[in-house]
Amino acid sequence: MSKKQALTEFHRGSILAAAERLFAEKGIDKTTMDDIARESEYSKATLYVYFQSKEEIINAIFLSGLVLLQRKLQEAIDTAANWYEAYEGMCAAVVRYYGERPEACGVLVNGGAGLQEDAHLDQEVRDILRVRRSIGQLLADFLRQGAQEGLIRLDLRAEELVLLFWSALEGIVRMASQRDAYLGQTLEVDRDVFLRHGCQMLLHAITNPAPAEEAAQPE
């Protein structure tokens, strides 16, 4: 990488980091380009040298996050001793992803910032859709592996189960974020425990009873 390219990546990274902080604090809709310029300590004119619009910044953040999530999911599968351990690692990766990027809730289910399949999409948007499909395929293959091992039942097509899985997990994460006080004061569980219980509930919903019970038995 040349010096010029390295400098460009540094400035882009600084702008994206500032935007992520603001999106997490204020939300995407309430964050303006002026806000991002102030937070990143660049002029607004400089911002437009690296990004043509707020939507381009949003897409760049979604893309980098999805690429990282895909890598973490693959690592969870590759390093696990068995299917159940891989499942726990994948759930932990997704929960951590949404914890660090709450504005990304929805991107795996409906494409996030209004992304739709279209022949005229920018390259970055195409990349988001490509990575999102890859993540979906990764999970579908993982579910098929569980079915082949006799661990889970596939009453639905794996692709449909993937969408249901993401929808349910995103809903659990949203609930934990929005009702944190309620969880502690009324249910007397903290956010991490609630999320762990939610992941286990999803597992029981797709797992054949006997293997699941056997796997839960202490050694």
Image (cartoon, rainbow, N blue to C red):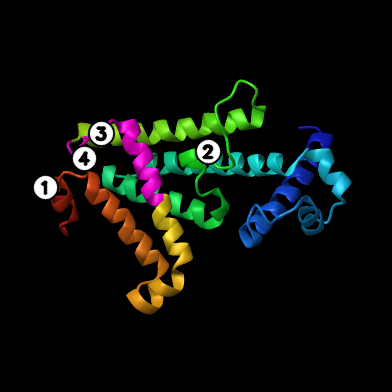
> Tag 4: residue type?
Ile
- Residue type at the position of mark 1: Ala
Nearest the viewer among 207 and 6 is 207
For the residues labelled 3 and 4, say whether their Cβ atoms are less than 8 Å apart. no
Magenta range is 150-169
Where residue 89 appears, x then y in whole percent?
38, 49
Q: Are dots 3 and 2 in contact, CB under 8 Å?
A: no
* Circle 2 residues within 10 Å: few <14, some 14–19, many ≥20: some
Q: Residues within 10 Å of mark 1 (few under 14, many from 20)?
A: few
| Front in this rendered view, residue 155 or 94 | 155
Question: Of marks 3 and 1, which one's residue comes earlier in the chain?
Answer: 3
Q: Does the CB distance between marks 2 and 4 fall below 8 Å?
A: no
Using residue 32 as the reference point, say whether residue 28 is left or right of it: left
**Name of the residue lying farthest toward the top:** 119
| SS state under label 2 | loop
Residues at marks 2 and 4, CA–CA distance in whole angstroms = 28 Å
**Mark 2: which amino acid?**
Gly
CA separation, marks 2 and 1?
A: 37 Å
The residue shown at (33%, 34%) is 160
In the image, residue 148 sits, relative to residue 151, either above or below, namely above
Q: Amino acid at mark 3?
A: Leu
Q: Image quadrant of residue 100?
A: bottom right
Q: Is 149 situated above or below 29?
A: above
Residue topped by disc 4:
152
Disc 2 versus disc 1: nearer the observer: 2
Residue drawn at x 23%, y 48% as measured from the top left:
205
What's the CA distance linking mark 3 and mark 1? Answer: 20 Å
Q: Which residue is mark 3?
A: 156
Q: Are marks 2 and 1 in contact (CB under 8 Å)?
A: no
Image location (x, y in percent) of residue 136: 42, 34
